[in-house]
Image: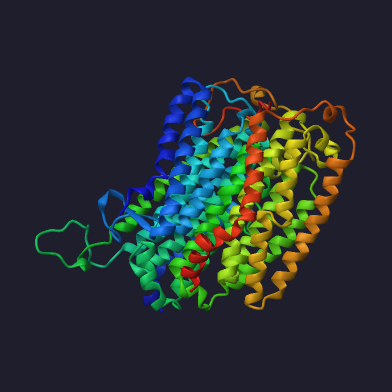
Amino acid sequence: MSQLTILPLLPLLFGAVIAMLAGLWRSAASQITAVVSTSLALVASVVGLVTVVTDGPLSYDMGGWPPPVGIEYVLDPLSAFLATIVALIGLLVVCYPVDAAFDLRPAKGTPLYPLVLLLLTGLMGVMLSGDLFHLFVFLEIYAISTYGLVSLGGDKGTFAALRYLLLGTVGSGLYLLGVGFLYFTTGTLNMADMAQTLPAIADSPTVLGAMALIVTGLGLKMALFPLHVWLPDAHSYSPPGVAALLAAVQVKAGAYGLIRILFDVFGPAYTGGTGLPVSAALTYFGLAGIVVGSWLAIRQVDIKRLLAYSTVAQLGYIGVGIGLATPRALIGALLHVLSHALMKSGLFLVAGGIIQRTGIKSIPRFSGLGKVMPWTMGGFAIAALSMVGIPPTAGFFSKFYLIWGAIDVGNWLVAVVVVLSSLLTLVYFLRLFERIFVVTPQEDVVRDATEPSWRVIATVMVLAVLIALVGIFNGVLVSHVLEPIATRMLG
Amino acid sequence: MIELFLARYVYLFVLLLLAIGLYGVLAKGDLVKKVIGLTIFSTAIYIFFIEGSLQEGATAPVIEGDRTDPALYVDPLPHLLILTAIVVGVGVVGVALSLLVRLYRTHGTLDEAVIARRIAGREEPAPTSPHHDTQGDQPDDDGDDDGDDRDGPGGRA
């Protein structure tokens, strides 16, 4: 029992309330509150990560009731790793200037930062919860704040938010139904407690039904192909800052839920092979997502839409890693959660800067932007190279582990698809780089453009440096954090 | 066969409600009907939990005297869970309705296909909207902030 377990969560939750009140006075005060609370959450997550990696998992019993009766919060290396990503991306997005991040200067009292903090609270709660029903509540907390944030994107955003709301609620409904199946079979909701009971009854139809419902529900939340239909609209019509948060961390909550429940709660019932082809389904739907997502992405003209479809493809990689269920593939999936968070938020924030300065969203009009905005477009280039998977960026190593894991189980199709889709993306981005950096500016609006404000450049540069650092020092990360996680889950 | 049906008919009812709700969400063209479908879908889940906690001959979980056999009491946890889930569901429906209000103010219709075509630019934008002040890029100044959303669809800087 340790208070450190819930420390990453508390600043965000209280920050949401304080930012709400502060926003009534000054909207700048609201932003400062958000920056302070996300920084505190980041510090707590990093301290938590270092502590649990050296000393083993921590848990906290809400209200002093010990599990399985009470609600337990668990901080283990997996949740601490994801909590750190959530807090880091959250901090960068709230530091980003508000007019570029949210397309607007919010009116006094607009609950913009409270919603962002509530979204982060929900995500953090999903990562820390040790109880299946509690996880559902946090899923809904972050989902409801997402609907509000997506609807900031004007008329189109409102429509996308409503469509997302309908599908997202069906997704959490299916998850809840699956949890109900499990509860009536095992009589507990605590994850660790349930993991003790489940292996004995792994082949009962109820447990298999629960697995199918939970995978479908969380697959909807995670936007795993073909359940991704809500994602392109919600991510491309919401303001750039919101899109960065959604693509970088929000969809990862679904991925985390899948990893935690499939490997930790079902455990051998999933990894040992079941009567239900869940792992094959995740692998092949993931592959289909990679192909379809990449193909649709390079056909887009609008920069934000391209990034949204590319998120579908990148989530496919994570789905493949979960589906293959080998230690190296799982390391690949977890590393990809981190590298995709860094590069996709970087790309969305660059897009925000470009849109703020020039108003250009269409990629063919990007000609010559590299000459007038060298820093911003430099960040864009690093993030895009990482997206393709050029060493030594972070994106290379996650794909590398994924392919390695696929070869471990002799699944060559995965290796072929991952390499081919990377080549496809490479060709596309090389042509885009030529347009951005080599061609001289043609439009007046590009020629007159200047670098966005220093806060945009600083955020993008931090992300670019992190992409390079995660790539170069990925060995440290893998051997200290990810390998123990994968070994514990898959033996 | 008939005993099995009598013992399990509530689950059939739950399945039916789930199917109706899902059909409403996926197949109906009217956005309000979709939200209604969503409510039916969630209600089916609530009923499933309540039915699962029932026991023949059991009573409310208040321990009286020496009746300490757990079989004499209904499992209270599902009720508690569903109470929470209902609150969450009310929040979601509230957000959905506020989004619907905003869409209706802008487009004057709640037909999903029409709004989707307008947003994709394949159809003229809302010709005569009943509330002109919230249309297009003009800032919304009628002060109807609904709490969860920024007040107004426009205001792009």
Of the pair B78 and A42, the residue shown nearer to us = A42
User: Which image quadrant: the N terminus of chain B?
Assistant: bottom left
Residue A39 placement, left or right of A157: left
Q: Is residue A122 at all visible to an observer of this figure? A: yes
Residue at the left extreme of this rendering: B65
Count of numbered circles on the image: 0
Scheme of image coloration: rainbow
What residue is at 43 percent from the left and 26 percent from the top? Answer: A21
What residue is at 52 percent from the left and 47 percent from the top? Answer: A86
Q: Is residue B6 at all visible to an observer of this figure? A: no
Instruction: Give the x, y percent position of residue A1.
Output: 30, 54
Residue B29 placement, left or right of A421: left
Instruction: Give the x, y percent position of residue A53.
Output: 44, 58
Residue A426 placement, left or right of A328: right
Instruction: Give the x, y percent position of residue A307.
Output: 71, 47
Instruction: Give the x, y percent position of residue A443.
Output: 88, 30
Of the pair A121 and A353, the residue shown nearer to us = A353
Of the pair A76 and A445, the residue shown nearer to us = A76
What residue is at 26 percent from the left and 51 percent from the top? Answer: A64
Quadrant position of residue A403: bottom right
What residue is at 39 percent from the left and 76 percent from the top? Answer: B4
Answer above or below: position of A183 versus A42. Answer: below
User: Which image quadrant: the C terminus of chain B?
Assistant: top right
Residue A474 placement, left or right of A200: right
Quadrant position of residue A161: top right
Answer above or below: position of B145 versus A296. Answer: above
Answer above or below: position of B100 versus A224. Answer: above
